[in-house]
Image (tube, grey):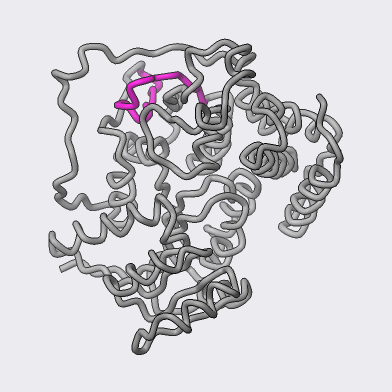
Amino acid sequence: MNRKRIGIIGSTGSIGKSTIEVLKNLKKNNFDVEVVFLSANTNITLLAEQVKELSPRCVYIENPGKANEFKNNYDFKNLKVITGFENLLELVRSDDYDMLLAAVVGFYGLAPIEEAIKSGKQIAVANKEPLVVAGKIINSLLKEFNSTLLPIDSEHSAILQCLSGEERNEINKIILTASGGPFRNKSIQEIENSSLEDALNHPNWSMGDKITIDSATMMNKGLEVIEAKWLFDIDVEKIDVIIHPQSIIHSMVEFTDGSIKAQLGIPDMKIPIQYAITYPERIASDYSRVDFTRYSNLTFEKPDLIKFECLRLAFDAIKGGGTYPVVLNASNEIAVELYLKGKIKFLQISKIIKFMLDKHNSIDDFEMEHIYEIDRNTRKEILEKQSWNL
């Protein structure tokens, strides 16, 4: 019987909830998983349900007020409830678990992932941003502390599966597929006049608001390009993006002999989540299967880098190297936040990112403290600006 002890940060988000479903399937198929800890921001009602179901030893609640509310409203025997970011990092450093499943969104996940690596843990990572801003440093730490990092993103999971049994020096290129999001067939003018509801109406995937907007701008794919560079140690010139609206082929690898391997499946995050948890094994599941008779056409097209400027900016940032990806990510996170709050228009997201990249003096030889400083200063500058009429 297999056994794995895991801690989940971001258990109440969309990836976290899918992970809980995966754990049910694994237990049903005699893969013994113990959940040691969970973390959430404010959704203590769902967190309480997860505690009842999984019986973790500890929960971390980011919001102090919600942490107090949780303690007052729920009385779980032998459950430790903590708050305060330093306590989360201490929890991640603990010795009584094997895998950290990082299901949080954005830059927030960098510090916990760094601490998990230094503790020699296996990490299943859903958020791209830590590798985007600190890929070189993270790869160095993985080697130093004999840790491993496994992707949960469907695209990177697909590449990992395609590379199984292959030599890395035989890769000709990696092909990341993208759905094209809700604005694939829209003109720039139509996008300019679109509503927030339009931008959040993803055709294939059910995700949190931030990732859904990233998909609409195609920044999500840009971040995945940078992530793929570091995950698979490949030059960015060997990474292509192609739009595949049906989201059945999750990504492909072309080899030096001209052969191409692709990983296919329905758009369901439970499949890559489970693969990361059980890697390199495969455990049976009753998840839905692809019925190819329903897909008479699998189509492909080039992304429009004028309409989807964020994707072009991501390529520019990683080709520029240094700390440009740090500015790219911080600018994007704040711009998306401003858009979701109705403070800027959709097309201003890319304009803000470009503005911040253009004025940035990149550092080539940087440490982790430079990343935190640049991230902090970039966010501060954007938020302090009175208007963004770009």
Image point 41% across, 73% down: which residue? 37
Residue 168, placed above or below residue 246 = below
Of the pair 93 and 180, the residue shown nearer to us:
180
Residue 91 is situated, as x and y percent measured from the top left of the image, at 51, 76
Name, please, the residue furthest toward the bottom. 78
Residue 198, placed above or below residue 153 = above
Q: Is residue 155 visible?
A: yes
Residue 267 is situated, as x and y percent measured from the top left of the image, at 31, 34
Q: Is residue 248 magenta?
A: yes
In the image, taking residue 154 as reference, residue 365 lies left or right, namely right
In the image, taking residue 376 as reference, residue 183 lies left or right, namely left
Q: Name the image quarter holding the N terminus.
A: bottom left
Instruction: Report which quarter residue 34 is drawn in.
Output: bottom left
Of the pair 127 and 212, the residue shown nearer to us:
212
In the image, taking residue 48 as reference, residue 266 lies left or right, namely left
Residue 107 is situated, as x and y percent measured from the top left of the image, at 62, 52
Q: Is residue 215 magenta?
A: no
Main SS of the magenta part reads: strand
Report the number of numbered marks.
Answer: 0
Q: Is residue 234 visible?
A: no
- Magenta extent: 239-257
Residue 73, placed above or below residue 32 = below
Q: Name the image quarter holding the C terminus.
A: top right
Of the pair 108 and 75, the residue shown nearer to us:
75
Image point 29% across, 15% down: which residue? 298
Residue 370 is situated, as x and y percent measured from the top left of the image, at 78, 54
In the image, taking residue 75 as reference, residue 326 lies left or right, namely right
Image point 79% across, 55% down: which residue? 373
Instruction: Report which quarter residue 307 is drawn in.
Output: top right
